[in-house]
């Protein structure tokens, strides 16, 4: 089956967004499309059939109008420290591979990559692959699974994207082309300039000169625009529509995870990443998000004074929401008998304790809030929300903490609410209940808007010819 790959001259060049737009465009053409990224590095993940995958491939599957599954991102690397990470293979953590040095992992991971890719190529009419970083990282070519090796295995045509907003885009494209091995260079079919601001006429004669030097056409100049999709790592500066709204401060500890779930908040509130106590000022809701390493992030909270700042806000009635790892931090104690995360005292804002188990729990979940919840969370009473859980921690009540939801999925003490379930603040009904405003557009509509902008500014027929559907 035809395969198309989007590579980039660097991280943040726009690979994920271009892949998302191309998946939706080809799906609109009536093709059965699947996304694929051999190995992703991100602490933003979603629960799909078989376990967890990176959020980018989850969104690309939605764009392709197909059911996400673990084969679309067979290897997910979740950082836990500067030199330590958890490796998720086909949706499940692999402790043995996680313990290996980076360069020693590839032989153990390639079988899962090739099996997943072959299965998708057999089942779908088109597979759209995404690269990682740059294919010209010559220090890593011997152990790279995601760029040249995956493209070769899929026999894919390749598009190369550069972020022109950074400057130096033509040098990035030419330098990448120049460093590629001959076989990889032959696969390269087109260049795309992304995030362009200004008049495209000012680019002349650079695209023509680049084509003359490389033989590769520039097939698109995509303007800089606010796409409103979650970023792969959930790290971009939040967007404000300028409408006066409630301030929500989400604490950005070093290993914060699943920050993408707060993207919808930007449509109904003024979202602020908080890294110091001063960032909490004026906020009507404080959020402790998920964490890939709870003990480390809890220590960081204390080191910058956010532990006492959060407690002080809770004492005066400011709402505090802890999600998954954030809930675990709000409790009294962390227990770690298997050395999964770390042990220690929590913030003691909820009378719960968490034990980190060896096996990670990954599942979709429906959280049903209890009736008669107290102010300031009374608006959530009796509501049901679909979400997902990704956690090693098992949390239980150790005192008079009131259960906020059925099945042990949440607890509440005054203004402090802790939930094991991600995704609650993506629900339009919950956002209306808490903020009095509904998001202006859905995820699917956002993907459509992204696709419309991208495909207006690249040669759509060129793309279609590469996959044989023109």
Image (cartoon, helix red, strand yellow):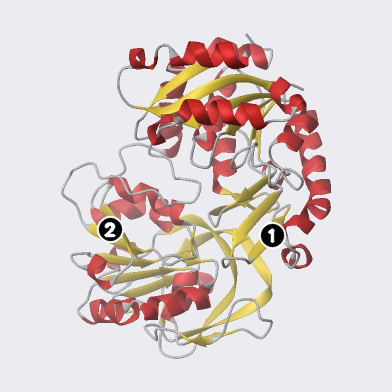
**Quarter of the view holding residue 317:** bottom left
Name above or below for residue 354 compared with residue 146. below
Residue 328, percent across and down? 48, 77
Residue denoted by label 2: 434
In this rendering, position of residue 287 left or right of residue 292: left
Residue 198, percent across and down? 30, 22
Q: Which of marks 1 and 2 is in front?
A: 1
**Quarter of the view holding residue 466:** top right
| Residue at position x 45%, y 80% in the image | 299
- Dot placed on the residue nearer the N-terminal end, 1 or 2: 1
Residue closer to the observer: 399 or 141: 141
| Residue at position x 42%, y 23% in the image | 222
Residue 107, percent across and down? 83, 52
Secondary structure beneath label 2: helix
In this rendering, position of residue 412 left or right of residue 433: right
Residue 457, percent across and down? 43, 17
- Residue farthest bottom in this picture: 399
Q: Are marks 1 and 2 in contact (CB under 8 Å)?
A: no
Mark 2 is surrounded, within 10 Å at the Cα level, by few (under 14), some (14 to 19) or many (20 or more) other residues, namely: some
Residue denoted by label 1: 87
- Judge whether residue 382 can be spotted in this image: yes
**Quarter of the view holding residue 389:** bottom right
- Judge whether residue 23 can be spotted in this image: no
């Amino acid at each position: 089956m035809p395969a198309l790959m989007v590579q980039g001259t660097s991280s943040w060049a726009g690979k994920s967004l271009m892949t998302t737009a191309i998946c939706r465009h080809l799906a609109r053409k009536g093709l059965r499309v699947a996304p694929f990224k051999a190995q992703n590095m991100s602490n933003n993940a979603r629960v799909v059939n078989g376990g967890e995958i990176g959020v980018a491939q989850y969104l690309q599957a939605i764009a392709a109008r197909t059911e996400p599954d673990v084969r679309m991102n067979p290897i997910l690397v979740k950082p836990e420290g500067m030199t330590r990470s958890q490796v998720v293979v086909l949706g499940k953590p692999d402790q043995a591979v996680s313990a290996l040095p980076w360069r020693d992992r590839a032989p153990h991971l390639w079988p899962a990559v090739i099996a997943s890719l072959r299965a998708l190529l057999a089942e779908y009419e088109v597979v759209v692959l995404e690269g990682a970083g740059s294919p010209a990282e010559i220090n890593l070519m011997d152990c790279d699974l995601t760029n040249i090796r995956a493209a070769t295995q899929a026999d894919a045509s390749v598009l190369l994207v550069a972020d022109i907003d950074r400057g130096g885009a033509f040098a990035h494209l030419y330098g990448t082309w120049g460093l590629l091995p001959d076989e990889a260079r032959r696969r390269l079919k087109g260049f795309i300039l992304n995030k362009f601001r200004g008049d495209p006429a000012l680019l002349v004669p650079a695209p023509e000169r680049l084509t003359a030097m490389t033989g590769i056409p520039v097939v698109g100049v995509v303007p800089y625009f606010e796409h409103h999709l979650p970023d792969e790592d959930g790290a971009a500066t939040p967007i404000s529509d300028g409408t006066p709204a409630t301030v929500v401060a989400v604490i950005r500890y070093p290993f914060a995870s699943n920050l993408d779930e707060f993207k919808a908040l930007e449509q109904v509130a003024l979202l602020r990443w908080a890294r110091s106590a001063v960032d909490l000022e004026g906020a009507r809701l404080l959020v402790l998000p998920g964490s890939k390493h709870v003990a480390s992030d809890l220590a960081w909270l204390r080191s910058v004074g956010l532990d006492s700042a959060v407690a002080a806000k809770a004492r005066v009635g400011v709402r505090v929401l802890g999600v998954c790892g954030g809930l675990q931090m709000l409790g009294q104690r962390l227990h770690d008998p298997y050395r999964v995360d770390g042990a220690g005292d929590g913030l003691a804002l909820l009378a719960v304790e968490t034990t980190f188990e060896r096996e990670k729990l990954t599942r979709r979940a429906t959280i049903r809030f209890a009736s008669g919840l107290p102010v300031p969370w009374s608006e959530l009473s009796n509501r049901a929300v679909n979400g997902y859980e990704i956690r090693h921690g098992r949390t239980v009540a150790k005192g008079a903490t009131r259960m906020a939801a059925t099945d042990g999925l949440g607890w509440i003490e005054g203004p402090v609410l802790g939930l094991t379930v991600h995704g609650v603040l993506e629900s339009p009904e919950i956002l209306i209940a808490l903020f009095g405003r509904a998001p202006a557009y859905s995820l699917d509509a956002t993907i459509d808007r992204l696709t419309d902008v991208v495909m207006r500014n690249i040669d759509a027929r060129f793309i279609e010819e590469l996959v044989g559907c023109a």
